[in-house]
Amino acid sequence: MRPDDHRTDRAMPGSGTEFSRDEWIVAIADHGVDPTDMPGRVVGTDGRDPLARRRKGAHRKTSPKRNNDSFSFRDLLIWCVVPFVAVLLVRIFLIGFYVIPSGSMRDTIEIGDRVITSKLTPKYFDLKRGDIVVFHDPANWLNQETTRGKGDYLIKRLIGLPGDVVECGGAGQPVKINGVAIDETSYIKSGVDPSSFSFRVEVTAGHIFVMGDNRASSADSRYHQDDGDHGLVPIDNVVGVGLMRYWPLNRMSFLSSHHDVFKDVPAGKAQ
């Protein structure tokens, strides 16, 4: 055995740099993997040995990573504010909620029922005969309506469109639209006449003729012939069409427009 086998430092051929025994082994191993020439020891710009820094850094503890599953304030905003804004927009532009304060639409809608309306009609869709409409009080009708609520909204069924002639011969007689009698037994209150008195109204442009389903207790278009619009409701006053009753839960159901009742009625005069 030669004396230099016990030396702890060796020089890399051609480099003039001394390595410890372990570094020598690593250098030779690395040189065997990488086909490029083995460089001499490199000293960093700060004067420190990068290899020594790597050895020292290998024993450092890694800093804990941020928990990506944590619930941030931004997440809170997304989960709370976005749904709230969405519901608010739907409430403002698409649907309305109303409490029914009177019995003028019995038995279709009872006192205290809560209904949802679509605001898309008549803004984007045409009104039809039979639609249940919610509208602003056109001429102080509420003074003659027995209610227990506040506000200036009424709810009735649309019977006549612009150009229609709506009439009735009195108690026991059917309502006629443009000369055609309609059978209203599917929605008017049982045991009540379509009208207890006679009337005849021609619906003018931009207006509708409305009646309550409980004809014996509804101060509707029939009762306001002298209000300036002959009992008619301006279409601009209509804020929505009834879709469903959502309260009470045991009576939750969609509200029927009974369009089939009017299927044989011809179109009214052009307005």
Image (cartoon, helix red, strand yellow):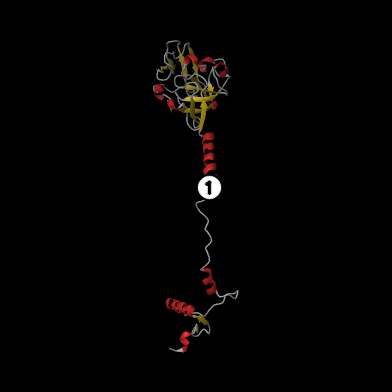
Say which of 228 and 112 sits in front: 112
Report crowding for label 1: few under 14, some 14 to 19, many 20 or more residues within 10 A (C-alpha): few
Q: Position of residue 234 (x, y in %)?
A: 54, 24
Q: Position of residue 208 (x, y in %)?
A: 50, 22
Numbered disc total: 1
Q: Position of residue 69 (x, y in %)?
A: 50, 51
Say which of 110 and 122 sits in front: 110
What residue would you read off at disc 1?
A: 75
Q: Is residue 87 visible?
A: yes
Which amino acid type is shown beneath numbered disc 1?
Asp
Look at the image and tell me in which quarter the N terminus lies.
bottom left
The reply, left or right, for residue 129 in relation to residue 85 is left
Q: Is residue 255 visible?
A: no
In the image, residue 121 above or below residue 106? below
In the image, residue 89 above or below residue 209? below
Tag 1 secondary structure:
helix
Say which of 108 and 169 sits in front: 108
Q: Position of residue 240 (x, y in %)?
A: 50, 28
Say which of 4 and 164 sits in front: 4
Q: Outermost residue, bottom direction?
A: 2
